[in-house]
Image (spheres, rainbow, N blue to C red):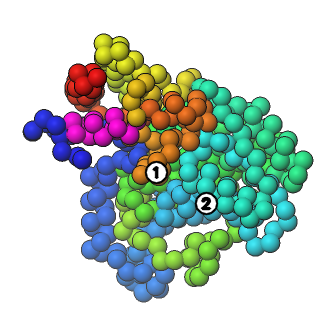
Amino acid sequence: MGTPHTPGSRPIYLDWNATTPPHPSVTRAMAGAMDEAWANPASVHAPGRRARALLDGAREAVAALIGFDARDVVLTSGGTEANNMALAHPFAHGQSPGSLVVARIEHPSIVRAAERLADSGVVVEWAEPDRAGAVSVEQVLGAVARATARAPVRVVAVQAVNHETGVIQPIAAIAEAVHARGALLHVDAVQAVGRLASDTWSGADSISIAAHKIRGPKGVGALVVRSSVRLRPILFGGAQERGLRPGTQDPVACAGFAVAAERAATTPTRYADLAALRDLLAEGLGRLGERHRQAPLQNGEGARAPHVLNLSWPGWSGAELCAALDLEGVAVSSGSACSAGTAEPSPVLRAMLGEERALSAVRVSLGEDTTREDVLEACARWERVLARASSDR
């Protein structure tokens, strides 16, 4: 896989929700840090202090981006660890019984963490999405009521933007309703930060972010928590991150994270401009699908992030279509990158629309570097795939 079908054709990357290419300013900052600030940031000598300054810089940049204080930022290995910490800490170390409410269409790092907590005896209730891919306030409150009948709700988790469909969830309204019932709201904002305005996660008590989704490095992220929330560690060892996340931090990754977070404050306007390209792509794929009697069905309606398009292709396996496009030099995906390699269809789309739509789904996600020429060329290559399939049938 990965070799374009047409020799010499340039690759077209349309999988920005899976990861983003590191920005040159990020790689420059990391290269400089590797030479000058490689020491252990916990050391009190001058090399250690230089390394520690890069951690502090990342913390300040993330805080400014999210709208919190730098003291509220816990550096993690990425969004997955941040999500696990946010869900696990209220139930850690013999705390009094409580329950958790989770939306069924969350990222695997939320869903699997919730399932693990359920296995350990925590009451978990699921808020179901509608067919458009949104989780309503009413659905959340219904799950809260069911959970409360068994144990007080401690945390509700709803993502800001769905990682597969791009559907934007009504976080501000959910936050108001959840707080009125005495619970905290955790928001996985990994797919929202740097792409949408900060009101997308307004009202959240804790927020997850991953550097590699905003053109930073992999292996670093953050859990940002309101100062009124008392976090409890789920790992034990040293005193790093105020004892909440022990382990030696990577100052080189933090140097890149800081630059990426600073850039991300300006990128939502660039993403807004992608809506026209996303719509152009949707129209082009719709037309060519009809020509080849394989008209795609859109997954996710209503308010959506401007760069995401998710389509089910009747008669295709999403994974097979992605593989065929990869041979044409077009990179797309058939679901969450964190679920790649599994035989199961997308659990998000299965919860929304059923097994058949999930099995045939392909996600296309554009980014800052995507051009009109990329979109038109992607459509041309997509048509070659469909034409070959039609001739084989």
Q: Residue at x 31, y 61 (%)?
A: 29
Residue 50 relative to residue 236: left or right: left
Q: Position of residue 336 (x, y in %)?
A: 47, 45
- Asked whether, in this view, residue 185 is left or right of residue 390, the answer is right
Which residue lies at the image location 62% right of the left edge and 51% below the top edge?
A: 111
Q: Amino acid at mark 2?
A: Asn
Label 1: state its secondary structure: loop
Under circle 2, the secondary element is helix
Which residue is tagged 2? Answer: 84
- Asked if residue 233 is among those painted magenta in the image, a careful observer would answer no
Residue at the (62%, 79%) spot, across then down:
236
Q: Which residues are magenta?
A: 318-332
| Quadrant of the frame with the C terminus | top left
Q: Amino acid at mark 1?
A: Thr
Q: Is residue 255 left or right of residue 155?
A: left
Query: Can you give x and y, in whole percent of width and height, for residue 333 in the image?
Result: 38, 40
Give the camera-side residue of 108 and 294: 294
Task: Please tell me which of labels 2 and 1 falls first in the chain.
Answer: 2
- From the top left corner, tell me how far across and down residue 264 is, in percent: 43, 45
Quadrant in the picture for residue 38: bottom left
Q: Nearer the viewer, mark 2 or mark 1?
A: 1
**Which disc, if any, is residue 342?**
1
CA–CA distance in space, label 2 to label 1: 21 Å
Q: Main secondary structure of the magenta part?
A: helix
Residue 194 sits above or below residue 206 on the image: above
**Residue 132: in sight, yes or no?**
yes
Q: Position of residue 287 (x, y in %)?
A: 33, 14
The mark total stands at 2
Tell me whether circle 2 and circle 1 mark residues in contact (CB < 8 Å).
no
Residue 199 visible in the displayed image: no
